[in-house]
Image: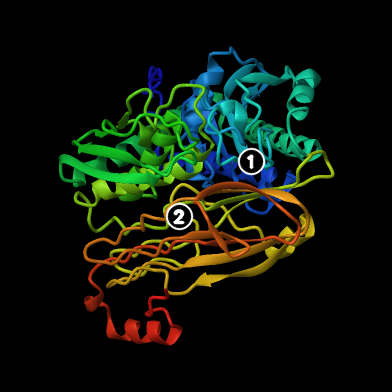
Amino acid sequence: MSHDDSNSNSDTDIDAVTLEIMRNQFEGVAEEMGQVLITSSYSPNIKERRDCSTALFDAEGRLVAQAEHIPVHLGAMPEAVDTVLDYDPEPGDVFVLNDPFEGGTHLPDVTMVSPVTVGDEILGYAVSRAHHADVGGMTPGSMPAGAQEIYQEGIRLPPVRLVKRGEVNDDVMSLLLANVRNPGERRADIRAQIAANERAEERLGDLVEEHGRERVVSAFDAVISYSRDRLLAELADLPNGTYSAHDVMEGDGISDDEIPIEVSVTVGDEEIEVDFSGTAPQVPGNVNAPLAVAKSAVYFVIRCVTDPEIPPNEGCYDPVSVSVPEGSLLNPRPPAAVVGGNVETSQRVTDVVFSALAEAAPDRVPAQGQGTMNNLTIGSRGGGDDGFTYYETIAGGFGGRPTKDGMDGVQVGMTNTLNTPVESLEAEYPLFVERYGLRENSGGHGQFRGGLGVVRSVSVETDATVSLLTERRRVAPHGIDGGEDGRCGRNEIDGERVPAKTTRDVESGTTITVFTPGGGGHGPAEERDPDAIEMDREDGKMEWEE
């Protein structure tokens, strides 16, 4: 990211105590935005699963604070703000966008960017991003397994003023709602995002009243400098050198051919360079990932391997450079299909960068987790407000860690959502949960075993379209340092195993079952504590189920 640092010396009057107070206040603004969005939205995907993110930027477009929501959203948000700045935002505007080639990630992630105005001057920008359960396209839920162009994935919005000087542009709203299923639900979720951004303006106004405008602007610079300094200190503790790794995607939904991802990570005293030369060219299917998504995955790993407690803002991203060849899987040219790149390829980028850094920081890198979001989308054909679209990412096993077992049944890597509670799912949709529990014996053995995946079976009580976008169905999550691999996942429709990436029309009464992968083990199994082994035997988790 390149931004004007002309104000970089304006933080000299911010003492350490004031810095900590104001940093927490900025993060509180972002967190409160998230609470407004979650409590005001209508769709279960946002209000229950919390598939949304919020953040605060300064007037130059630098990230100042973010709520701890979805990693793949947050690291990519600066690209959205940079793009909106090219459109000359004015006080009272709200820009909406989802175009992956103009600041977005994939089409279901709809982003709102609002200038935050105190007095008559723009002080910063409020940003909210939420995964909408449908944005049009060839299948209900807008997550088609067989898409080969972005046009098939939904309505594509470059940055456009949805609100201009405080007035909603009804023409833009009508155009958007005419191209989606469940327009009433979409309208409610859009209003929730606007309300979240408005809350940021209220709270930042309160901070200006408390501290004064100059002090707030100085604090923006100070928190960014603080994070940069802390990350540089962490980099100094990593051994300099270049570290490489390789992994694959299991096809693109059009072909089952493996798609290589290669990375080299060069650690220096004041910079870390991540180069994806050697990664496959972009593919016909939808697992291409926009550059913003690849960067987001890299930023996530760097934060994990250094110090996750460093406040996430522009400062902790500045020392990180990411190089990706144009026209490749991780930097595709339009009109590439990309909906799976955001949810699945981002996970593999996370895996491969962790693997590269395992040599540099072996005590900080876990074995591979499930490495997939296990995307399940079910929707009625025909659309309209009487129809439904259900979307879920399903948890799995976290990899064994250097000092403890992996966690069972959690979201891993680039997603941080909750599950849809069974009661909510069955109340909102014509669906019935037949089975939901941990998948025994799915974690890899090791001194510290991999976490367990889950099994989720959902029956459909009406004719519908089902889409599955998943990974780690052939290539298992790898163990590390002598630990065994976790168990691969699998997908079934009425007991029939189906491919990792599938879209199918089904009849009422059909049952979809997703078995999610377990995490890899860490360290040799023979070094496992005997008491832990006995406990595992009692739980039935030591036997490898066929």
- What residue is at 37 percent from the left and 79 percent from the top? 542
Relative image position of residue 261 (x, y in whole percent): 32, 39
Q: Which mark is residue 412?
A: 2
- Residue matched to label 1: 33
C-alpha separation, residue under disc 1 versus residue under disc 2:
24 Å
Relative image position of residue 538 (x, y in whole percent): 42, 87
The answer to whether residue 226 of the structure is visible from this angle is: no
Q: Nearer the viewer, residue 437 or 222?
A: 437
- What residue is at 32 percent from the left and 40 percent from the top? 260
Name which residue type carries label 1. Met
Q: Nearer the viewer, residue 523 or 288?
A: 288
Mark 2 nearby-residue class (10 Å; few <14, some 14–19, many ≥20): many
Q: Earlier in the sequence, mark 1 or mark 2?
A: 1
| Looking at the image, residue 323 lies above or below residue 447 | above
242 with respect to 164 (left or right): left
Say which element carries label 1: helix
> In which image quadrant can residue 451 be found?
bottom left
Relative image position of residue 456 (x, y in whole percent): 59, 64
> In which image quadrant can residue 107 be found?
top right
Relative image position of residue 14 (x, y in whole percent): 42, 33
Q: Nearer the viewer, residue 168 or 243?
A: 243
Q: Which mark is residue 21?
A: none
485 with respect to 498 (left or right): left
The answer to whether residue 168 of the structure is visible from this angle is: yes
